[in-house]
């Protein structure tokens, strides 16, 4: 069994960091031959997760960083995004597809991440999200 390859990054809690995420995902796509058919899903889901960490977790606090890592294994591409916020209960976020929630801004990011990836797990009281994309 081959060992996983892990790459770690630290991002500033500012909206400009989202452009860095795109650059990082582009570099990972090249380095690990991520297929074009899942690349778009990865880019959108990971950007959404980092955006949530910056805005909702760290509340744009320049003193707080977002830890971002990528793990390449035989079975999957695994992304972990961790903020330094107070956390949240992922089960408390309203389903954005229900009629009563269509006009509410909350919950769309998690909905997007869940629907574009193969697996989403929240840990550390919602401060860390793990997003997995299976390799075919």
Image (spheres, rainbow, N blue to C red):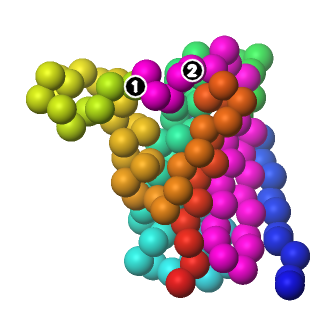
* Residue 69 sits inside the magenta stretch: yes
Of 63 and 121, nearer the camera is 121
Q: Which residue is mark 1?
A: 93
Answer above or below: position of 120 versus 50.
Answer: below
- The magenta segment is 67-92
Of 70 and 17, nearer the camera is 70
* Residue 105 sits inside the magenta stretch: no
> Which comes sooner in the sequence, label 1 or label 2?
2
Question: How crowded is the residue under tag 1: few (<14 C-alpha within 10 Å), some, or many (20+)?
Answer: few
Q: Which residue is mark 2?
A: 88
Answer above or below: position of 112 versus 16.
Answer: below
Q: Residue at x 75, y 39 (%)?
A: 67
How far across and down, in percent of the image, does residue 23 sit? 60, 58
Answer above or below: position of 94 versus 50.
Answer: above
Q: Quadrant of residue 53?
A: top right
Which disc is residue 3 wearing?
none
For the N terminus, the quadrant is bottom right
Q: Is residue 132 left or right of residue 40?
A: right
How far across and down, in percent of the image, does residue 72 sit? 73, 70
Q: Is residue 4 left or right of residue 85?
A: right
How far across and down, in percent of the image, does residue 35 sit? 51, 81
Cα gap from disc 1 to disc 2, whole angstroms: 9 Å
Q: Are marks 1 and 2 in contact (CB under 8 Å)?
A: yes
Question: How crowded is the residue under tag 2: few (<14 C-alpha within 10 Å), some, or many (20+)?
Answer: some
Of 91 and 117, nearer the camera is 91
Q: Is residue 83 in view?
A: no
Q: Quadrant of residue 85?
A: top right
Q: Quadrant of residue 97?
A: top left
Q: Residue at x 58, y 53 (%)?
A: 131
Secondary structure of the residue carrying numbered label 2: loop
Q: Is residue 115 left or right of residue 127?
A: left
Q: Residue at x 56, y 72 (%)?
A: 134
């Amino acid at each position: 069994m081959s060992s996983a390859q892990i790459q770690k990054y630290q991002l500033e809690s500012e909206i400009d960091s989202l452009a860095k995420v795109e650059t990082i995902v582009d570099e990972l796509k090249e380095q690990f031959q991520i297929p074009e058919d899942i690349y778009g899903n990865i880019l959108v889901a990971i950007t959404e997760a980092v955006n949530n960490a910056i805005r909702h977790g760290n509340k744009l606090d320049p003193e707080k960083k977002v830890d971002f890592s990528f793990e390449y294994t035989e079975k999957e591409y695994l992304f972990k995004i961790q903020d330094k916020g107070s956390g949240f209960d992922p089960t408390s976020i309203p389903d954005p597809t229900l009629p009563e929630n269509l006009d509410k801004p909350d919950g769309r990011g998690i909905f997007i991440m869940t629907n574009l990836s193969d697996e989403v797990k929240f840990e550390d009281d919602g401060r860390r999200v793990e997003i997995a994309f299976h390799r075919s």
